Image: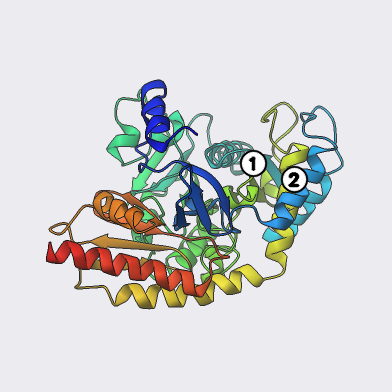
Amino acid sequence: MTTSAELIEMSERRSAHNYHPLPVVIHEAHGAWVTDVEGKRYLDCLSGYSSLNFGHGHPKIIEAARDQLDNLTLTSRAFYHDQFAQFCAGLGDLTGKDLILPMNTGAEAVETAIKVARKWGYEVKGVEPDQANIIVMEGNFHGRTTTIVSFSTDPEAHDNFGPYTPGFRLVPYGSTEAIRQAVDPNTVAVLVEPIQGEAGVLVPPDGYLSEIRELCTAQGILMIADEVQSGLGRTGQTFACDYEGVVPDIYVLGKALGGGVVPVSAIAANRDVLGIIQPGQHGSTFGGNPLACAVGIAVIELLNTGEFQARAAKLGEVLHARLRELIGKGVVEVRGRGLWAGVDIDPELATGREVSKALMARSVLAKDTHGSTIRLAPPIVVSEEDLVWAVNQLADALYELNTA
């Protein structure tokens, strides 16, 4: 068997260094646990950035994928296939929207929402050609395409990829007054993450999403909610917007929609918005393919039970209560909602990566962001016992660092 060290060396030598992975090589996974090539087991507390909300290899999702693999995997949208209608209807019912436009990755779905908002602005709102602007938030993360990084405030994602796409207005996250001041007659949409994941699991002030919804309605502009990471059960509700009873004009969905099996993304909107797209104006060879739709249908059916939302809410209370006990013991602040937490490590004690490595040595996989923050987002199928054990490993790692 090839060792982890050999595989890491080959990966570093033969691949572009666009990621900085922890030095672990995963071979197989089941539920919330993964196993490396040497046979060591780890509790996955990242879940593929919420792609694995239902765990690794969920039986219902795997069964749907296997059944579909035996029948049909791809037609392109040049033809109908027998999984497409049920997927669109199911996701439309889950979101409460008339229409679905499926894509593959989260970034593609965000790009789709941007295109739809601009086209709606020109054809419905009456904005002059090429004058549309979209209000976006500082600290955002919506993907890494050239248009999306044009409005990123993260130097690593943004710098040296210009010239940049115009048409975006940056405002501070959490301030509806800043949004209000940025709106002008050419504004077509506000694009917002209900919780900013990459920025460190930042939860906005209470009422923020409701105020955005009211402002957008009053100004005649679209509210676009990027729920790629926060949606589909992660926060204890189907969508993070549900905590404020807010329904955006466009949902942007991805990651968990593919069940950890295939890339599946989509936007969902009503006919008066998404109906402006006509044949030939947007598409994807793999978007809405039979395999993706079959997996998506299984995911939607799991969410329709409400079991995963309730479980994330219940276990989230356990997670956050235990994490708050670590404040002052190497932890500066804890944020998040449901089974999703951003943990700020005291920078005088260690970096986020150093703590992530210490956790890896203790069989817990997590990931750092922005220097001193680690993110915890285990699969929703994690047991309460394993969840508490993982936080105990963090507590022990911090204690060792404090006493070193």
Q: Quarter of the image holding residue 153?
A: top left
Q: Is residue 361 left or right of residue 134?
A: left
* Residue 238 image position (x, y, % from top left): 60, 65
Amino acid at dot 1? Val
Secondary structure beneath label 2: helix
At 52% from the left and 64% from the top, the residue drawn is: 240
Which of the two residues, 15 or 302, is positioned nearer the viewer here? 15
Q: Is residue 75 left or right of residue 8?
A: right
Mark 2 in CB contact with mark 1 (< 8 angstroms): yes
Amino acid at dot 2? Ala
Quote the CA–CA distance across marks 2 and 1.
Answer: 9 Å
Which of the two residues, 403 or 351, is positioned nearer the viewer here? 403
Farthest-out residue, front: 1
Q: Is residue 189 left or right of residue 82?
A: left
Does label 2 or label 1 sit earlier along the sequence?
2
**Residue 281: which disc?**
none
From the image, tell me which residue sits under label 1: 262
At 59% from the left and 38% from the top, the residue drawn is: 112
Q: Is residue 153 left or right of residue 55?
A: left
* Tally of numbered discs: 2
Position of residue 227 relative to residue 286, above or below, is below
From the image, tell me which residue sits under label 2: 65
Would you say residue 173 is visible in this rendering? no
At 42% from the left and 66% from the top, the residue drawn is: 208
* Residue 316 image position (x, y, % from top left): 47, 72
Would you say residue 343 is visible in this rendering? yes
Q: Counting other residues with Cα less than 10 Å from the Cα at mark 2, is it few (<14), some (14-19), or many (20 or more)? A: many
* Residue 378 image position (x, y, % from top left): 48, 61
Q: Counting other residues with Cα less than 10 Å from the Cα at mark 1, is it few (<14), some (14-19), or many (20 or more)? A: some
Secondary structure beneath label 1: loop
Position of residue 326 relative to residue 51, above or below, is below
